[in-house]
Image (cartoon, rainbow, N blue to C red):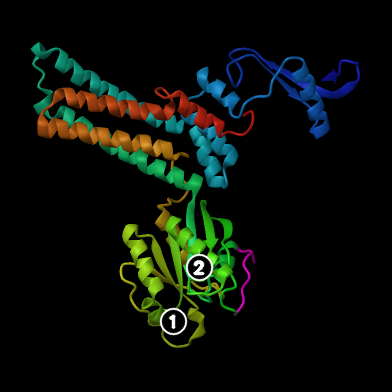
Amino acid sequence: MSWITDPSGHAIDQAIILFFSTPHSYTGEDVCEFHVHGSPVVVDLILSLLLELGARLARPGEFSERAFLNGKIDLAQAEAVSDLIDSSSIVAARLAIRSLNGDFSRLINTLVASIINLRVYVEAAIDFPEEEVDFLNSGSVAAKVDRLLDEVAVVLKQAKQGVVIKEGIRVVIAGEPNAGKSTLLNALSGVESAIVTEIPGTTRDLLKQEINIGGLPLHIIDTAGLRESDDIVEQEGIRRAWKAIEEADRILLIVDWRQSENFRNSGIWQRLNLIAQIKSRITVVFNKIDLSDETLLLNSCGDFPTISISAKELIGLDRLREHLQECAGFIPEGEGGFIARRRHLDSLLRTQLALSSAKVQLHKFKAGELVAEELRNAQQSLSEITGIVTADDLLGEIFGSFCIGK
């Protein structure tokens, strides 16, 4: 324990001061840590004193950036630090820890090593034709490329799972007024966040809730009822509803089952069909099934999946939750491997494309030099994940998104 005093000798705080010498610190550099009491006034006084003595505030992500540049962690591990801080569920936190421990990086490094070994073989056969290694027709290179494609596909599947757990999916609840959209939002979130009345058009703007289903983050948006309206405020709400529908990862189209036939003949249904033709992401949810003792007969909704519920009586909600997990490609905890980002998906997809192209060059064109070039492209794309090959502007973008300091 040491006293920290100002230039006049007045005590500011009693602190624990720890020194970590190179390379035994998080950044790999000489680091001095001050453990002080948490009062904002005390912290500000000590920071001001350090700044007067020549120190400066750390940039966002600077400590992790220095750790990366000094070889203490790779780029995927550095990103996992930020992902761990931002994790929104226990599952996300556990997967971020796996990435931080190097699970993801080890998979990538193993793939890179396999590609390098194959490159060495192919390029040696090209450079030394007198050895008479006919790799174009032997089948061994083709088999190794196929095996690499299978391994990349496995990692890609796990990475997609990691992205879903990190980012979640955007779910929009849409439908006509009084179909039960706000009731469903309240039922899914467990919070009375939306006003529910018998008066059509109660919801005028977008209502957003963040919920978690078994580790899958959902960004749920309740929208204004879709209909023709002369009300200027309601018109703006409906415009925003259509915009949210177009941007959604999944659309829950809520239909009062008693009005299902009329709804399917409406202009709204036709417009939704046009959206679905671009990207099939609509689930038709027949609501209010509790309002009849008769056998429920529902009309087909084309290729759209359908689910029957009563949002008010909480009937069918478990099936709806399972359906949303299936739509997201969510895998139960324990089967996924690590947290991942969209840039990782991009690198893996480019790797997959390069290996597929190498296979085409091998089988169709018998072009050994182009096989070697595609293997080089695959290696470079994969290496971008761990930062072995990367650009300065990418580093700035990654570490700039970190919290201040860390």
Q: Nearer the viewer, residue 76 or 401?
A: 401
**From this viewpoint, which residue is outermost toward the bottom?**
294
Callout 2 crowding tier (Cα within 10 Å): few <14, some 14–19, many ≥20:
some
Name the image quarter holding residue 368: top left
Q: Quadrant of the N terminus?
A: top right
- Label 1: which secondary element: helix
Q: Position of residue 330 (x, y in %)?
A: 43, 52
Q: Position of residue 331 (x, y in %)?
A: 42, 50
56 relative position to 360: left or right: right
Q: Position of residue 373 (x, y in %)?
A: 23, 24
Looking at the rendering, the stretch of residues picked out in magenta corresponds to 190-198
The structure residue drawn at horizontal position 25% and vertical position 26%, both measured from the top left corner, is 375
Q: Report the amino acid beneath label 2.
A: Leu
Q: From what the image shows, is residue 331 above or below residue 175?
A: above
Q: Tag on residue 259?
A: 1
The structure residue drawn at horizontal position 51% and vertical position 61%, both measured from the top left corner, is 240
Q: From what the image shows, is residue 288 above or below residue 222?
A: below
